Image (tube, rainbow, N blue to C red):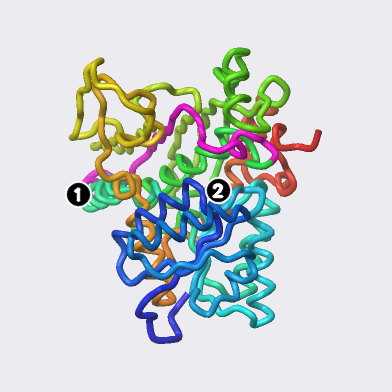
Amino acid sequence: MNTSHEPLKTLRIGMVGSGFIAHFHLKSMLGVRNVEVTGVYSPTAANRAALAEAVAKMDLGRCIAYDTLEDLVRADDVDALWILSPNDTRLDVMRTIHRLVKERAASLVGVACEKPLARTIAEAREFLSLAEDAGLNHGYLENQVFSTAVQRGKEIIWQRAVPASGRPYLARAAEEHSGPHEPWFWQGKRQGGGVLSDMMCHSVEVARFMLAAPGEERSALELVSANATIGHLKWTRPEYAKQLGERMKGVDYTRRPAEDFARGTLVLRDPEGREVIIETTTSWAYVGAGLRIQLELLGPEYAMEFSSLNTGLKLFLSRNVTGREGEDLVEKQNAEQGQMPVVEDEAGIYGYTSENRHMVDCFRRGETPIETWHDGFDVVRILMALYRSAETGQTVRFPVDDLEDYVPPVARDD
């Protein structure tokens, strides 16, 4: 998308959603220039009021908590929307945005959406169609692509190593923690699946990004095959299913569990015709210090690796230091004592700050982000192929014609 107007001096953002991820995005905005958060809508009045209050405390603008989504979309002081609501609500949100823009009741330049873009290929296709029919710039909020380690590591590999020995041929991406914050993540129908949907979307896209040349479309890596295994390792055990049900209202893993472990292998063909491989592992059954992200990129004469828990800052707290449970050292923290890694700038290290800086600048200038809903669509297509492989026990080979309406088993109607 090319700009046809003078860049906006300040991009005024409205947030749809006021949960954990919305507050994470809000923290990252402190590192973004030329932006204000001027509105928020979510169904729970107390939650949207709390986010508006947080905006005021951070001095990120005068944020109004709106009673309806329509009021937020119509607001004169909102230029772009960040869709951060639960997966099962997002398509209806986008339909409302599309309708109001087409009716000229709203004046927006862009819309960004958290991962994954949708729960099925059909939903993702409609998402993309609605945005483009409304003439809206669109950004796919995949933070790991914008991680400081990924951005810097890829830059060095492609500047120094690739010219000397050739393109990379293997990317590994893993993300593991002890489980999501909110009940809807655990409900297969609402979320669209289990950990494969929730977290392998990260792993697939950051791996594709690392394997692609700078400025090269991820679609230049042609999909050949997908193979996956899923498991129910922890949360279906009776004691943990009971614990989960007590902690998460409406979640019953004795009756309808979603997978808490997934492993996937993708074979692709790069523009030179060589096969490259992506290996991914995701889990809600990892109990360690907290959220663990591990990334690797391998080529003929080089290797790159990153682990989010190999931090430069570590603390030791003896058994005599006690306090309430929290996540002040690392996201999904599982302990308050002992040797603890500290992620001193989670919003920056995980990529949220760079991601939002990029999206804000692109929306202000009318430029196409490096992550769009075309990329989000491709990720959903890959996830559905992986789910089909896990369900059938067979490798899925591309092209695949019958995945358009495919729904993972745990997300199907009873």
Q: Which residue is mark 1?
A: 160
Image position of 311 (left or right of 21): left
**Residue 203 x, y percent position in the rendering:** 45, 40
Give the amino acid at mark 1. Arg
Q: Residue at x 52, y 53 (%)?
A: 18
Q: CA distance from mark 2 to mark 1?
A: 33 Å
Give x and y (percent) for residue 21.
Answer: 47, 48
Residue furthest toward the top?
238
Q: Residue at x 62, y 74 (%)?
A: 134
Sequence-wise, the earlier of marks 2 and 1 is 2
Q: Amino acid at mark 2?
A: Pro
Figure check: 41 above or below 317: below
Per the rendering, the mark at residue 116 is 2
Q: Secondary structure at mark 2?
A: loop
- Classed neighbour count for the residue bearing mark 2: other residues with Cα under 10 Å, few (<14), some (14–19), many (≥20): many
| Residue under the image location 56 percent in, 18 percent down | 233
Q: Range of the magenta residues?
A: 160-189
Residue 330 on the magenta span: no
